[in-house]
Image (cartoon, helix red, strand yellow):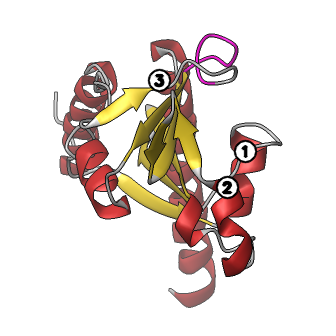
Amino acid sequence: MKFKASTISLLIFNLLAVIYLLLPTPQLKDLDSSVRSQEPGDTVQMVNVTGHYTNLSRREVMNFYRSFYSGPFMIRLNYPPEYAKTIFRDTMQSYYLEEFHLPFKESLFINGYEWAEDVFTKPENRIQNKLLYHDIEYRAKINTKIIPTSIPARFLAFFITEIAIIFVIFLYKKFWRQNFA
């Protein structure tokens, strides 16, 4: 039985994709040099959400989480801070919002609020937003939200996408042959 090179390539690609989709997602630790928040909305009230008070900079926070989500398929997205109200809760304060996305697997949203850099508050009024937790002042509050997917959902999304791409390529080839060959 003869197989075309494209069929063998597709089988190898799918085998690698299945391995990728079955690999476990990163297990996050608490943010280094931080205190875990026990405030409402930062614990069990919102699924997969945690909050931390810290004096780390944005770069240090992003580097910490990037160490868990490194890899060739990780996509890093930067959103306007206003989107935090949609992704987390409508009372969320935000200075920056980033996402580490593992295609077909999981997303990690990182919302950072630095009171001294708040763009929505006039500089002379920012002191009112100072972050105090247990009578200790912090530079920033970091909230994370993990949006996981189940393994069946991963496979379904991946293979539907793959079938759609193959169908579009088939239609494009057919169109090309009919009009330009």
Frontmost of labels 2 and 3 is 2
Circle 2 — which element?
helix
Residue 156 drawn in magenta: no
Earlier residue among tags 1 and 2: 1
What residue is shown with label 3? 155
Kindly tell me whether residue 41 is visible in this rendering. yes
Which residue shows up at 80% across the image and 42% down it?
Answer: 91
Residue 8 in the image: state x and y as whole percent.
Answer: 19, 39
Q: Which residues are magenta?
A: 42-48
Earlier residue among tags 2 and 3: 2
* Above/below status of 21 relative to 82: above
Frontmost of labels 3 and 1 is 1
Q: Residue furthest bottom?
A: 180
What residue is shown with label 2? 129
Q: Residue furthest front?
A: 135
Quick check: 177 left or right of 62?
right
Earlier residue among tags 3 and 1: 1
Q: CA distance from mark 2 to mark 3?
A: 45 Å
Report the front residue among 85 and 33.
33
Kindly tell me whether residue 109 is visible in this rendering. no
What's the residue type where badge 3 is placed?
Phe
Circle 3 — which element?
helix
What residue is shown with label 1? 92
Number of disc labels = 3
Residue 47 drawn in magenta: yes
Circle 1 — which element?
loop
* Above/below status of 26 relative to 109: above
Which residue shows up at 30% across the image and 63% down it?
Answer: 59
Give the crowd class for mark 3: few <14, some 14-19, many >=20 residues within 10 Å.
Answer: some
